[in-house]
């Protein structure tokens, strides 16, 4: 090994990050990143994030940040065959949770906390999920103090220049293959937090509380939350309609509008529930009809082109149809195996994507290798090479068609339902009028 070459473990880790960055790019149709993305030379920082999509949450943060980050993970993951190797080479740190070990004694993680504090002091970065567990709630659950205690311990041991940063994760359909995700990197906070949250004199439990409170405030500011799932759905739908009227189809645009809608809902909570009920009823009626017709709100929005036609892209898509059909046929088995295996392993929404990716990482390469091997065993070399090219490229054509299929279907339905569009537009206008009146009443 050359003198200036990185150590083997670093090479393996960088290779894993590269691999999973591309895996995430295949699993999600779009990964949007916004906010204060950390620089490559970021050091001594604890990243904190909400936790609703299993191991996928950690993979998203580690592969989108420019700097190196070591995730904190529950110790039971090291008991899973094969996963231990990945976690160790990714630099993950195991933490024993009381829910995993009822006999856990107070202070049993002290050695780990000291190790993490020392790592932070020497410039390492850590990722932790302060909710303590992946969950299916429409809002943040109560935060644990682990992240704050790690920072406080490093600070008490003399480390300076420490920071922490919230990262909000949003998904349009977190357990669905080829859905979308958004990462919002929040403000960078110093340790100790500055007034009014804390002061330079904070130490011990007071410092831990100040950091934990700031983490909760930052994540709450970045996320679109609801007290219940019906409330979260209402906020999401109103935000979608408002964002579509601006012509912004991105999750970032939806998130920005959604946080303002959430603030409006909070302002009305317990004060004017009748107004909320009127808005909810109008929005629900509109979306029920949309679903009946198989259409999307973006098709009826004021800045919509209805069909969303891109002539060149659609022409290229049409030309790729034979290759896409080959991909669907060739990979039907691993596709179904991955989907059914994930469903068999777990029925928890926040874990489905993790198992789909895990099973897929094994199933697809093995299947592709088998197809290529069979081709070279049965066909002449030129035909086998051509078949191998189809095996390797056809799944990407199939993905392009899978992404485009909902838009194409909606465009066809839109063209066939001209007589019913007036009713849908009237329902939408009624809902938007109530939303506008509410915003005006609140001065928003």
Image (tube, rainbow, N blue to C red):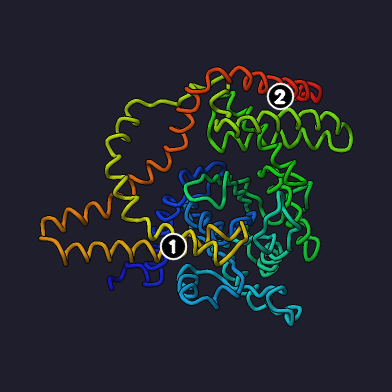
Dot 2: element: helix
- Name the residue at 71% across, 53% down: 137
Place of residue 281 in the rendered image (x, y in percent of width and height, measured from the top left): 76, 31
Which quadrant would the C terminus be assigned to in this image?
Answer: top right
Label 2 to label 1, Cα distance in Å? 43 Å
Does the rendering let one see residue 392?
yes
Compared with residue 3, is residue 127 higher up or lower down, i.e. above or below? Answer: above
Compared with residue 87, is residue 292 higher up or lower down, i.e. above or below? Answer: above
Displayed quadrant of residue 264: top right
Give the residue number, with chain letter if any, for mark 2.
431
Dot 1: element: helix
Place of residue 80 in the rendered image (x, y in percent of width and height, measured from the top left): 52, 75
Give the residue number, with chain letter if any, for mark 1.
337
Label 1 crowd bin: few (<14), some (14–19), many (20+), radius 10 Å: some
- Name the residue at 68% across, 49% down: 219
Foreground pick, 140 / 39? 140
Say which label, 2 or 1, has the lower sequence index. Answer: 1
Which quadrant would the N terminus be assigned to in this image?
Answer: bottom left
Q: How many marks?
A: 2
Displayed quadrant of residue 362: bottom left
Side of 404 relative to 159 (left or right): left
- Name the residue at 47% across, 67% down: 90
Place of residue 22 in the rendered image (x, y in percent of width and height, measured from the top left): 40, 54
């Amino acid at each position: 090994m050359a003198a200036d070459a990185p150590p083997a473990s670093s090479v393996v880790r960088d290779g894993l990050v590269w691999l999973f960055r591309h895996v995430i790019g295949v699993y999600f149709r779009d990964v949007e990143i916004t906010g204060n993305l950390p620089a490559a030379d970021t050091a001594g920082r604890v990243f904190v994030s909400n936790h609703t999509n299993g191991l996928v949450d950690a993979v998203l943060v580690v592969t989108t940040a420019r700097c190196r980050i070591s995730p904190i993970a529950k110790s039971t993951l090291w008991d899973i065959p094969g996963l231990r190797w990945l976690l160790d080479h990714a630099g993950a740190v195991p933490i024993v949770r009381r829910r995993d070990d009822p006999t856990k004694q107070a202070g049993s993680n002290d050695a780990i906390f000291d190790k993490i504090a020392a790592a932070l002091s020497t410039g390492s970065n850590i990722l932790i999920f302060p909710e303590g567990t992946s969950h299916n709630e429409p809002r943040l659950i109560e935060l644990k103090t682990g992240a704050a205690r790690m920072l406080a311990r490093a600070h008490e041991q003399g480390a300076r220049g420490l920071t922490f940063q919230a990262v909000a994760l949003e998904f349009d359909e977190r357990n669905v293959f080829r859905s979308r995700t958004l990462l919002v990197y929040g403000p960078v906070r110093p340790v100790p937090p500055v007034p009014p949250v804390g002061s330079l004199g904070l130490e011990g439990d007071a410092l831990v509380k100040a950091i934990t409170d700031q983490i909760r405030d930052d994540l709450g500011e970045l996320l679109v939350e609801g007290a219940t799932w019906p409330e979260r759905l209402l906020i999401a739908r109103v935000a979608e309609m408002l964002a579509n009227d601006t012509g912004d189809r991105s999750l970032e645009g939806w998130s920005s509008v959604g946080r303002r809608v959430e603030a409006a809902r909070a302002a009305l909570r317990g004060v004017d529930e009748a107004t909320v009920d009127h808005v909810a009823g109008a929005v629900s009626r509109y979306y029920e009809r949309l679903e009946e017709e198989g259409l999307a709100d973006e098709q009826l929005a004021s800045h919509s082109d209805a069909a969303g036609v891109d002539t060149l892209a659609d022409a290229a898509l049409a030309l790729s149809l034979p290759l896409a059909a080959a991909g669907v046929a060739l990979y039907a088995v691993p596709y179904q195996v991955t989907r059914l295996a994930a469903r068999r392993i777990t029925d928890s929404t926040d874990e489905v994507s993790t198992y789909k990716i895990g099973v897929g990482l094994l199933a697809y390469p093995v299947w592709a290798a088998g197809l290529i091997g069979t081709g070279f065993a049965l066909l002449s070399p030129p035909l086998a090479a051509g078949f191998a090219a189809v095996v390797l490229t056809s799944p990407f054509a199939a993905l392009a068609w899978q992404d485009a299929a909902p838009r194409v279907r909606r465009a066809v339905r839109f063209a066939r339902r001209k007589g019913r569009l007036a009713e849908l537009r009237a329902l939408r206008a009624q809902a938007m009028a109530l939303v506008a009146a509410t915003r005006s009443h609140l001065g928003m």
